[in-house]
Each structure stands twice: as C-alpha cells, then as structure tokens.
Image: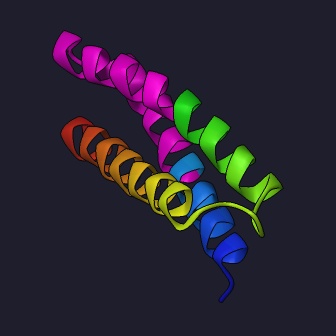
Amino acid sequence: MSLQEELKKLSEKVKQYRDEARVQMHLAREDVKDEWEDLEQDWDRFKNKIDQVLHDAENASQEARQTAQKLGEDLKNGYQNIRNKLK
C-alpha cells in the first residue's frame, strides 16, 4: 500500500471515529467536552498537514510524512478514548 493510500485510509478512520464521537457528545460530561475541544483543534492541524503531504506527496520529506502519520494516530486514539468514555 502506498503512503498516499495509507494516509487516506488513516484520515478516513479518524473521520469515522470523529463522526461517531460527535453523535455521542450530547451525553458527554464537561471534562469529556474539554477533551473534545482540544481534539478538534488537533483535527484542524491534522487535516491541514494531510492535505499538504498529499498535495506534495512525492516531494514531502520523510519527517513531514511521519509527523502527519503520528498526529493521525494520536487523533484516532483520542477520539476512540472519547467514544469509550461515552459508552
């Protein structure tokens, strides 16, 4: 699987977790809402980084690719954590 395919798949999974967590937010306690707001800021940075890496995929440095992938994994885990707290 190419880097672009991996990053697109990661982005889709993060979006899925984000969407599922958003649906459950109306049940959230205040501390979970604060965590959500922090993740939303990270989501914006992640989307910008992914767009940049995908646009410049052939010229993107290994460091930029790793940064985007790490941020994506952290976001996925953060949204999963919120989903678990809301169950």
- Give the position of the C terminus as an image quadrant: top left
Which span of residues is magenta-colored?
16-43
Nearer to the camera, 57 or 80: 57
**Quarter location, residue 29:** top left
Nearer to the camera, 82 or 76: 76
Q: Relative to 84, does residue 5 appear above or below in the rendering?
A: below
Q: Where is residue 35 in the image (x, y as percent from the top left)?
A: 27, 23
Task: Identify the main secondary structure in magenta.
Answer: helix
Q: Residue, x 69% and y 54% (percent of image)?
A: 53
Nearer to the camera, 17 or 4: 4
Q: Where is residue 76 in the image (x, y as percent from the top left)?
A: 40, 52
- Give the position of the N terminus as an image quadrant: bottom right
**Quarter location, residue 86:** top left
Q: Where is residue 75 in the image (x, y as percent from the top left)?
A: 39, 45
- 32 sits to left or right of 72: left
Q: Residue, x 24% and y 45% (percent of image)?
A: 81
Nearer to the camera, 33 or 78: 78
Q: Residue, x 27% and y 14% (percent of image)?
A: 34
- Looking at the picture, the colour scheme in use is rainbow
Q: Relative to 47, does residue 2 appear above or below in the rendering?
A: below
Taking the view exactly as shown, the residue that stands out farthest to the bottom is: 1
Taking the view exactly as shown, the residue that stands out farthest to the right is: 55
**Quarter location, residue 65:** bottom right
Q: Relative to 33, does residue 51 appear above or below in the rendering?
A: below
- 10 sits to left or right of 54: left
Q: Residue, x 70% and y 75% (percent of image)?
A: 5
Q: Is residue 63 magenta?
A: no
Q: Relative to 72, does residue 65 appear above or below in the rendering?
A: below
